[in-house]
Amino acid sequence: MVELNLKNIPVFSDLKEKELDELSRRVKEHNFDVGDTIIREGKIEEEEDRRMYIIKEGEVEVLKEDWAMNQIRMNTLGRGTFFGEMSLIDNEDRSATVRALSDTVLYSLSCKDLRSVLSEDGYTKVILNVGGEIGKRMREGFTRLADILKGVKLD
């Protein structure tokens, strides 16, 4: 079993101990070398492959393609942070590419495991927490966008 306290991850903070213990037993550990792509923007994944990741060690960058197919760094994430959480609530393509900036160890939890372990109430709590995290990241992104656009005249 992987040593991970899911209670410290905001998405799972409202779950019962029994649910957290069962989810912890299903967590997988992955190792990535510097430069490895962990998830790719636009990739469609089957339900058993849809996962969220928690960074145990290392650092990753979140990249988004612009209109000219250039990859723009949107964020960097380090130990204790997570990504891929939107895959727990929708069946959409990956919205960004995530690449290892250093040798990185990740924990992952699949959407399939989450749905099989949690009660309807527990799953609802996770979805609400994921929504809160997405909202927080959107506000941060809008603030960065506003800073970039200062002084740019839009017609």
Image (spheres, grey):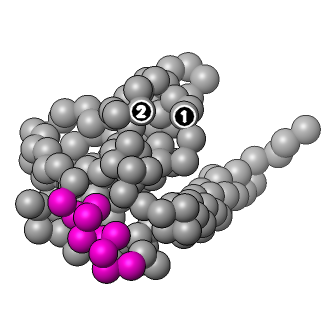
Residue 114, percent across and down? 39, 53
Image height of 31 relative to 117, above or below: above
Sequence-first tag of 1 and 2: 2
Q: Residue at x 26, y 32 (%)?
A: 37
Task: Using the image, tell me which numbered label, if any, was put on residue 47.
Answer: 2
Image height of 89 relative to 11, above or below: above
Q: Residues within 10 Å of mark 2 (few under 14, many from 20)?
A: some
Residue 56, percent across and down? 17, 62
Magenta residue span: 16-25
Q: Amino acid at mark 1?
A: Asn
Image height of 45 relative to 152, above or below: above
Is 33 positioned to the left or the right of 50 in the image? left
Q: Residue at x 26, y 64 (%)?
A: 22
Q: Secondary structure at mark 1?
A: loop
Which residue lies under the disc numbered 1? 91
Is 8 positioned to the left or the right of 152 in the image? left
Q: Secondary structure at mark 2?
A: helix
Which one is nearer the viewer's eye here, 46 or 17? Answer: 17
Is 122 positioned to the left or the right of 104 in the image? right
Q: Is residue 19 magenta?
A: yes
Q: Residue at x 41, y 27 (%)?
A: 45
Q: Are marks 1 and 2 in contact (CB under 8 Å)?
A: yes
